[in-house]
Amino acid sequence: MKKRYSFLILLFLFGCTHAPAKQDAVFQNAPIHALLAGCYTGTMTVQELEKRGDFGLGTLDALDGEMVVLDRIFYQIKPDGKAYRLGGDATSPFATVTFFKKDQEFSPGEALSYKDLTQFLDERLLSSNLFYAVKVEGRFKTLKARSAPRQNKPYPVLTEAIKDQKVFEWENLEGTLVGFRVPPYMEGINVPGYHFHFLSKDRTIGGHVIDFQVEGPRIEAGEGRKFMMELPENEEFLKFRFEADTREAIATVEK
């Protein structure tokens, strides 16, 4: 059996004191560049990902919807916008997870849009060079989200695949944003900046977040000072040639 390839980036910032690796490590099972290029075959099971984190996001085999991980439970958001609990044998071609640990907490006391939220956090998080897991709970006056449909081989690139995405718009909905702020130097490895998925309070609906207006949110942020990525060992990844620039593609799929 081929060995899996992995690398570890240790971010030694703000001194040498670190929480246990389990609490401040961000794990990923493939680079975002692979997903953008159309590598949608699941390479890691939910059972394996559970050992790496209890909070996070991603997608499923064949780009079959959105993945949300909250409170140790893995959910799939299908193109109907509904959330389904995943079994341990479900596989993912791309996921980012961590064991969530709160380092900072904020209660703005006012309504925030997506743009307002990112600006609020940028002004308060301690460093732009660390990963941050971000959890936002509140009542969403409006929320716009999407979910991509399952793809068939030969897989199209992601910018083509999401042309058939289903977009949902909800009002007066309680729930949680699950996401990350990724440092700019991780371009091609992950999505620089903010990336959120949503799950309703009753755990029945959700999706990849496009925009929102949240009233009086409670925000928690946890630092990620270690990053580990385990590269896929399947033929699809090993033989693929990565040539395209990711910036334009990321801007397209994140809208």
Image: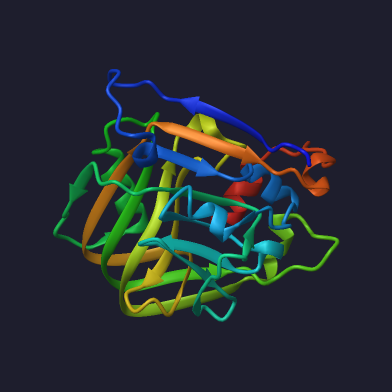
Res 219 → quadrant = bottom left
* Residue at horizontal 65 percent and vertical 48 percent from the top: 249
- In the rendered image, which quarter contains the C terminus? bottom right
Residue 32 screen position, x and y as percent: 62, 45
Q: Is residue 172 above or below residue 54?
A: below
Residue 231 screen position, x and y as percent: 67, 39
* Colour scheme shown: rainbow
Res 29 → quadrant = top right
Q: Residue furthest top?
A: 15
Q: Residue furthest front?
A: 1
- Front residue of 154 and 112: 154
Q: Is residue 146 visible?
A: yes
Picture mark count: 0
Q: Is residue 115 above or below residue 130?
A: below
- Side (left or right) of 197 relative to 34: left
Q: Is residue 191 visible?
A: no
Residue 52 screen position, x and y as percent: 48, 47
* Residue at horizontal 40 percent and vertical 61 percent from the top: 72
Res 200 → quadrant = bottom left
* Residue at horizontal 59 percent and vertical 76 percent from the top: 79
Residue 77 screen position, x and y as percent: 53, 72
- In the rendered image, which quarter contains the N terminus? top right
- Side (left or right) of 207 relative to 59: left
- Side (left or right) of 50 relative to 103: right
